[in-house]
Image (cartoon, rainbow, N blue to C red):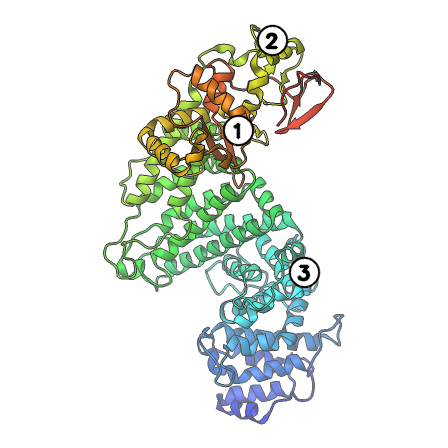
Amino acid sequence: MSFAAVRSILQLNTDETQALKFLPVVTQITAKKAVQGSTADLARLVDSIPIPCAPRFSCLVPIFHATLKSVQVPNYINLKTIPAIMGAKWALLGLVKICSAARPSAVGSDTGDSIVTKYIVRRWDEIFPWMRFFARNCLPSPYDVSVTPPRPDLCNVFDATKLCIHPLTFICTSSKEGRHILRSSISVQHYVAQLWVLVGNLKGDVLQGDPGSSTDSLVSMIRTSFTVTNNACISESEDPDKITLPISNYIHAAGGVKPVVYTLLRYIRRITRDAVAVEEPRSWTPSDKSVQHLHLFTAGLHYSFLFLKTISRQDASCRAQLIRQGSIRTMVDAITLILPKILVQTNAEMDFHSQLGLADRQNVLWMGYSYIASAIRDGDDGVTSVCQAIDAGLIQTLEKGVVCPPHANHREYPNGHPPRGRMGDVELLLLLPTFFLYHRVVESIFKHWFRVQSAPMAKREIRDKGLGVALELVLKSSIDAMDHRSVEPINPQEYKCSGPGCGIWTSEFVSKKRRCSGCLISLYCSEKCQRTAWRNGHKKWCQVLRCAVGPWGSRDIRTSLQVIAGFETSEISGMAKDVETRVREAQQQFPAFINKLVLMLDMTVFPPEIHVLPVHRLEQFPGKDPIWPEIADEIRQRSDSPPKGYMFSVVKVHLGKSKFTLFSPSMALRMAFESQYFVVDDSVDENDSTTLGDQDLDYGSEPLYDADGSEDKCYEV
């Protein structure tokens, strides 16, 4: 059946007409009828193009361009507009077919740009409106793929996918000018975002209209390749002078933060599943089909990881939503599943291949590690992120990495091993111990060791020595954290009222639990005990205890003072010689403050570092407060082994991007509670409390209470 002509004849110039004479005779006849406006012959012309030799038929491109230029995108679909629609469909399919076989390096002699730039990007105003038309009328709804497209009779989903998605893939991989269109056009970004959501929601492996000529999973291939297009929309431009749209525009186009997060995590899970399902290569060579598929899927994961890291860094709402939806667990699961496929040493030809080699395969893992590290290091709540990572099995996954050996003597890698990148496994591994001093993290460590004991891993040969050494240090630190958390209190008054001489346990309080809003640590059974404690020394130590929990009164810090104190004591004792050296250096560097030096244990790095500074040089610490010399004298009087050369010690910790300098927890707890550690009894409901005074303050998301508002009121920082 032949459709009516689009118009009597398409407009071709003399050179374009002459070029058609180099085609086979049968193709020339079909091309002539297509130029005269026959849609049926235009379809036959496209079908006659052999894919392996498609670039040789580039002389047909002017026919396709002329067809698109000769018609306008209709507002309605009826008998009059169907011929134009079918002509545009076959013209677009022809362009896709020719560009699909073109190499990125193929350039035209007249413009010097790639074939894709000449045939698609430079004709974007003619091509893009038709791409949107077929996406709107021949593809399912992005958010409900079960809905039948409005007009599948015009173009089935299989062909519509090629028309709507393939040109985007071409310009992302082959055209710098085309990539700028993706980054700078609001309408194009909206189009790409909607397609990204649609492809992410596709289920199964077969599209409607798929001829079934290939055994490969078409949906998996499309999903994986679309990650390149998606990432190009939000990546930085190669030309710094060109303006790109903010990432908020793309997020809005995709439906908001939640759809973006859900779709992205779904992409990662499904691409991971596809990568794991790849059959073991029969021979690790670049021509092996399984090797090629594995490369495709791991590249898809790489760009998905990169997209995740970008939106997490640039948009705070996405960063928080990703953590809430378990992005760290998803990332750890993905790395754990693909790691056996990635860390495979084969032969020199493959391991050092420019595209399929071990370095590029490992780079997928490093990108995933980099996101986990950034979520921990740059987030507001790094403790939660670390807990999620450990609970997901990150430490076990890193333990598997030691089996990948370094290569010996290769000119591109002087150290014998492909580069790890800026944030690889070792860097992430050494970030974890900086959070081992928190109670919640130690609980996750307990669970980790319980899993290891329940299902012990087979003994592995440590072939990556650098990772092996770092792993040993971190595991030792995790055991130390459990030891510090398990220390029994010297005095059971830890769970009692802090009032002098009061022996009531917190679980036996007649009224509700009362907490001092100044220090956030002391608990009292009654107003009487609180007043008595204030007059008997708490007035002096209230500010000191508050400085031990930080200026913002973080619950994570407050509930972890025993662990922090344990690390503080053990680290300073273990570096006794280094401490003496640092003190002598500080006395020479700051002779005017020789009596006001403070030892700082920096726990924000691993291994911890020691610094000695004047008290006023400490960040986020009331160094000029006159109470500190008095406290230092008290410490010297009551300590069996007073510190030599410095007043007291402080500990620098972080909760992610926020860092705090804390007064020595071990000293504060020991001096304020008569050599007893104090741990919060979380078994008592603190949210059901009554106030002692007339003011109710909120620190660390818990109700905290002053004294009675009189002159004996607790010190407030």
Residue 335, placed above or below residue 396: below
Q: What amino acid type is highlighted by mark number 3?
A: Pro
Q: Earlier in the sequence, mark 3 or mark 1?
A: 3
User: Which one is in front in this view, the residue at disc 3 or the one at disc 1?
Assistant: 1
- Residue farthest front in this picture: 592
Location of residue 129 by image quarter? bottom right
Q: How many numbered badges does the structure rendering display?
A: 3
**Amino acid at the residue labelled 1:** Ile
Horizontal and vertical percent position of residue 511: 67, 11
Res. 557 mark: 1
Whether residue 375 sits left or right of residue 128 in the image: it is left
Q: For the point 38% across and 62% down, which residue is it?
A: 355
Q: Quadrant of the C terminus?
A: top right
**Along the line of sight, the residue nearer the viewer: 23 or 324:** 324
Residue occupying image coordinates x 32% and y 36%: 472
Query: Residue 134: x, y in percent?
Result: 66, 67
Q: Is residue 651 visible?
A: yes
The residue identified by callout 3 is 149
Query: In 3D space, how far apart are the residues under numbered discs 2 and 1 (Cα atoms)?
Result: 26 Å
**Residue 96 locus on image (x, y percent):** 54, 73
Q: CA distance from mark 2 to mark 3?
A: 67 Å
Residue 608 in view (yes/no): no
Pointer 2 residue: 508
